[in-house]
Amino acid sequence: MNTAYPPSYYAASANTAPQRRQLQECVDTDVCVIGAGYTGLSAALFLAERGYRVVVLEAARVGYGASGRNGGQIVNSYSRDLDTIERSTGTREAELIGAMAFEGARIIRERIERYAIACDLKDGGLFAALTAKQMKHLEAQKALWERYGYQHLELLDADAVQREVATNRYVGAMLDRQGGHIHPLNLALGEAAAVESLGGRIHEHSPAIRIERGARPTVHTPEGQVRADFIVVAGNAYLGNLVPELAAKSMPCGSQVITTEPLPEEIAHALLPHDYCVEDCNYLLDYYRLSADRRLIYGGGVVYGARDPADVTAIIRPKMLATFPQLRETKIEFAWTGNFLLTLSRLPQVGRLGDNIYYSQGCSGHGVTYTHLAGKVLAEAISGQAERFDAFAGLRHYPFPGGQRFRAPISALGAFYYSLRDRLGF
């Protein structure tokens, strides 16, 4: 087990990767990227492919945060769907953002193929409906996505979904054949190696502690500094107060995951015959899939304010058993929490600080595909092609009600309301 990472199934099954040295000198480069999660790695890789000199600073290890601890599901679109975006922005911007909604999944597959990244890629994902109302939502979502040219969806009735998932909880589902799942930490490690193969530098254990703004801004770490033409801020929930204006309109939140012992092949096949990943349609949704070694990885829930629960298994195991009571005697071998960054709109925050500091943050729990798209969009903007970047930058964002002191309890109260509506079928 790689003890440099928080204990998790992903850390225990990670591919071998080097420990990158701490930055201990002054460096001059084209672009300094803060954060070696998916957003930072994607931006660094696209920039390196364009010929930029890139230095990535990581406070801990590559993929240490949400990128290495998430559910591993390739889910298209955004945390708020395209109809919400259409209502909140102009027609041209909505068209651009809609056209990008399915690009992140393509980028992931292209990266895996081009750089031969071993991360257990599997195709196919299900959105599962627990109520008739949720099924109607899926029908509308299918029509909406198809309006944007996406033709990889299939609606399943109750009988059909039970042939895909061994539970009687669902009244139907939507299959996204271009969804899927991966080992998330191994994807991050593979992308880091790809950045380095193109001459990029990654320094671990090198937190950014101060940004000195100016014509050529400088990022300071405890033992060194990086001066660059451009900075990409990609710390998300692990950024802290490095950039106060970004912290004001976002909130770190935690999500919990458990992993079973390896299941016998016949049981694993019975649970998910086609090895699809699944997420339900509740406001606080459950998500699950099988690992390459036939473990069930099951996650769900949100802890607002990113507190670490004392007993993750006690929170998530009852959810797993509500879906799969046949696993009552199955041992849970791993349990962990990871933080993601939530925005009030549930849409990502993208923009510039001055002329040379770019940022993308706030995937709101829907970041595996978006972060890969974000890296490409950031690289385009730095290269002078900012139309797609500006479409995201134009989205409106507001502070959470209650300020930093009361935003977590107020958000939790709102989540309770929507969860109650889910349970009552409203």
Image (cartoon, rainbow, N blue to C red):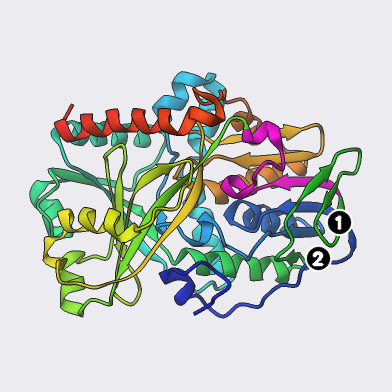
Q: Which label sits on residue 23? A: 2
* 240 falls in the magenta region: yes
Q: Residue at x 10, y 47 (%)?
A: 158
In the displayed structure image, the side of residue 346 where residue 385 appears, left or right:
right
Total marks placed? 2
Dot 1 and dot 2 residues touching (CB under 8 Å): yes
Above or below — where is 155 with respect to 309? Answer: above
Above or below — where is 388 with respect to 191? Answer: above
> Residue 48: percent from the left, percent from the top?
74, 59
Q: Nearer the viewer, residue 74 or 321?
A: 321
Q: Nearer the viewer, residue 384 or 202?
A: 202
Task: Please tell me whether mark 1 sits on a helix, a strand or a loop.
Answer: strand
> Residue 397: percent from the left, percent from the top?
56, 25
Q: Residue at x 59, y 32 (%)?
A: 392
Above or below — where is 377 with respect to 387? Answer: below
Q: Which label sits on residue 241? A: none
- Identify the magenta region: 228-247
Q: Nearer the viewer, residue 385 or 403?
A: 403
Disc 2 crowd rating (10 Å Cα; few below 14, some 14-19, many 20+) is: many
Could you tell me the amino acid type at mark 2?
Leu
Could you tell me the amino acid type at mark 1?
Gln
Q: Which label sits on residue 225? A: 1
Quarter of the image with the C terminus is top left
Is residue 98 something that shows in the picture? yes
> Residue 244: percent from the left, percent from the top?
70, 34
Disc 1 crowd rating (10 Å Cα; few below 14, some 14-19, many 20+) is: many
Query: For the residues marked 1 and 2, what is the alpha-carbon distance in whole angstroms?
Result: 8 Å
> Mark 1 or 2 closer to N-term?
2
In the displayed structure image, the side of residue 31 where residue 189 appears, left or right:
left
Q: Residue at x 55, y 25 (%)?
A: 403
Task: Please tell me whether mark 2 sits on a helix, a strand or a loop.
Answer: loop
